[in-house]
């Protein structure tokens, strides 16, 4: 098992090095640079419109929810209706995570740092506060059921894990079995949406019943803190995560 682990790690390192060399060889092109006076910050998440690749949505630290209709050359902040603001940023809008509704990409949800979740049905032109049953908490990661868009999952940095019932406009805390509630990332099995993984300050946890019960599955992970995880879309029993040491990847 140790030899297999070393071999897998070696292959992953070689793959990452090869991808890096390809990127270096082909080069990168700057498609957007912040204009003087424009509220800005780093990109927390970027989503490409599933039907129009020139339309991009971004959750940013400072400019909030921004949209590009020309492949990223220009961007427009769209935060009308997001009524809370963070101190310490130019505009006060700290968008940490977001999801688009698969069947209707004009509908989206965005997590605004310590101010909960907001919903738009018109591509970000207007937003609605949907925090009536969600306690004040730092939003961190979101994922939506690919077919049942009435179900949305939210991971928070300090406040736990929640499942949102769109039809009832209700958040339910789902942390049974989670040893640590500082959620870093969420991944959903594309073949079985009741199967989810979360990364935390205590490793990786898994649920097989839609988040009602979680089990810690961190055997082999070299650091307690795990930042992100991804499920193989073609072979969902395989997953890849990144822990505190950025050079170390773990394969499940």
Image: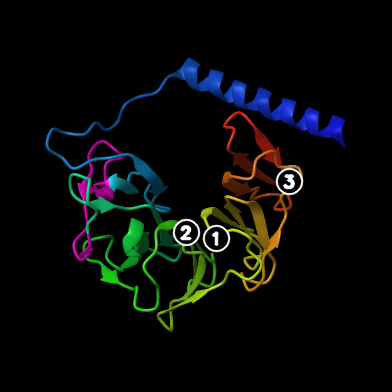
Quick one: label 3, few (<14), some, or many (20+) residues within 10 Å?
Answer: few
Q: Would residue 55 be visible to someone looking at this image?
A: no
Image quarter of the N terminus: top right
User: Taking 113 as reference, is 193 left or right?
Assistant: right
Is 68 magenta? The answer is yes
Residue at 22% across, 39% down: 74
The CA span between labels 2 and 3 is: 26 Å
Real-space Cα separation, disc 2 to disc 1, in angstroms: 6 Å
Q: Please, is residue 148 above or below residue 237 in the view?
A: below
Res 178 → quadrant: bottom right
The magenta region covers 62-84
* 2 and 1 marks in contact (CB < 8 Å): yes
Q: Is residue 101 visible?
A: yes
Q: Nearer the viewer, residue 37 or 75?
A: 37
Report x, y in % for residue 135. 39, 72
What is the count of numbered marks?
A: 3
Which residue matches tag 3? 252
Determine whether the residue tagged by mark 3 lies in a helix, strand or loop: loop
Judge left or right: residue 65 versus residue 159. left
């Amino acid at each position: 098992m140790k030899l297999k682990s070393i071999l897998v790690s070696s292959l992953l390192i070689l793959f990452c090095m090869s991808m890096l060399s390809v990127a270096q060889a082909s080069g990168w092109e700057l498609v957007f640079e912040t204009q003087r006076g424009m509220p800005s910050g780093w990109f927390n998440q970027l989503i490409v419109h599933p039907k129009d690749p020139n339309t991009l949505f971004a959750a940013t630290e400072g400019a909030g929810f921004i949209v590009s209709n020309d492949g990223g050359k220009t961007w427009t902040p769209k935060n009308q209706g997001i009524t809370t603001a963070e101190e310490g940023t130019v505009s006060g809008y700290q968008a940490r995570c977001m999801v688009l509704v698969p069947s209707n990409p004009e509908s989206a949800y965005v997590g605004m740092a310590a101010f909960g979740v907001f919903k738009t049905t018109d591509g970000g032109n207007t937003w609605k506060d949907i925090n009536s049953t969600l306690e004040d908490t730092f939003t961190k990661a979101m994922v939506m059921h690919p077919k049942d868009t009435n179900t949305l999952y939210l991971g928070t940095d300090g406040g736990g894990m929640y499942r949102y019932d769109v039809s009832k406009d209700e958040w339910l805390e789902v942390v049974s079995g989670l040893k640590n509630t500082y959620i870093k990332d969420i991944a959903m099995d594309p073949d079985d949406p009741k199967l989810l993984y979360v990364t935390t300050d205590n490793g990786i946890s898994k649920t097989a019943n839609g988040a009602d019960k979680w089990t810690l599955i961190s055997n082999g992970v070299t650091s307690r803190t795990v930042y992100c995880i991804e499920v193989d879309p073609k072979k969902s029993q395989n997953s890849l995560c990144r822990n505190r040491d950025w050079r170390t990847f773990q394969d499940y």
